Image: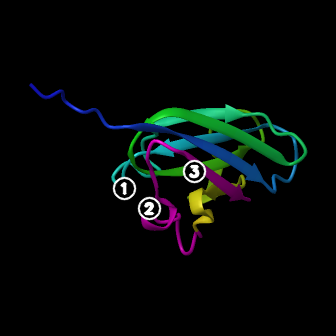
């Protein structure tokens, strides 16, 4: 009898640079599909900011496609401030996907994870 093989899992290390101030915190969201992109976070965390940088690690992430969105939560309320749908707090994405005429596209921000460590460096 064969044993069912489970999908491998890996680790995502996120490094964020270019944060304008050490005030507040970074909010980091990991998304697992195009349908959920910027709507429903698969896993999320907060990170303190030091010297204009922040970091986070997501462990035991099943193999597959993912994307990351971050924002500088300057007022520590856990919510992205917007005006008419336009972010008023600094935002960034995996692969440093550009926001042109709207939010970054899943296709530009997605990356693949296996059983290895994946590093994403996001520049704000």
Q: Residue at x 46, y 40 (%)?
A: 41
Q: Most extreme residue toward the bottom, as rendered?
A: 101
User: Picture coordinates of residue 44 (x, y %)?
Assistant: 55, 35
Q: Where does label 1 land, which residue?
A: 34
Using the numbered discs, state the Cα–Cα distance from disc 3 to disc 1 in whole angstroms.
Answer: 13 Å
Q: Find out whether the residues at labels 3 and 1 contact each other: C-beta distance under 8 Å.
A: no
Q: Residue at x 67, y 37 (%)?
A: 56
Q: Where does label 3 land, which residue?
A: 69
Comes first in the chain, label 1 or label 2 = 1
As helix, strand or loop, the secondary structure at mark 1 comes to: loop
User: Picture coordinates of residue 79 (x, y %)?
Assistant: 62, 39
Comes first in the chain, label 3 or label 1 = 1
Q: Which residues are magenta?
A: 98-124
As helix, strand or loop, the secondary structure at mark 3 comes to: strand
User: Picture coordinates of residue 9 (x, y %)?
Assistant: 43, 36
Q: Quadrant of residue 106?
A: bottom left
User: Picture coordinates of residue 55 (x, y %)?
Assistant: 72, 41
Residue 106: image tag: 2
């Amino acid at each position: 009898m064969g044993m069912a093989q489970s999908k491998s899992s890996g680790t995502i290390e996120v490094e964020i640079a270019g944060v304008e101030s050490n005030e507040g915190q970074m909010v980091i969201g990991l998304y697992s599909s195009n349908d959920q992109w910027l709507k429903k976070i698969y896993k999320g965390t907060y990170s303190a900011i030091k010297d204009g940088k922040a970091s986070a690690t997501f462990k035991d992430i099943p193999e597959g496609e993912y994307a990351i969105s971050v924002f500088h939560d300057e007022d520590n309320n856990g919510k992205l401030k917007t005006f008419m749908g336009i972010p008023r707090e600094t935002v960034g994405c995996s692969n440093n996907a550009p926001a042109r005429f709207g939010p970054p596209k899943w296709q530009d921000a997605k990356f693949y994870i296996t059983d290895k460590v994946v590093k994403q460096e996001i520049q704000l």
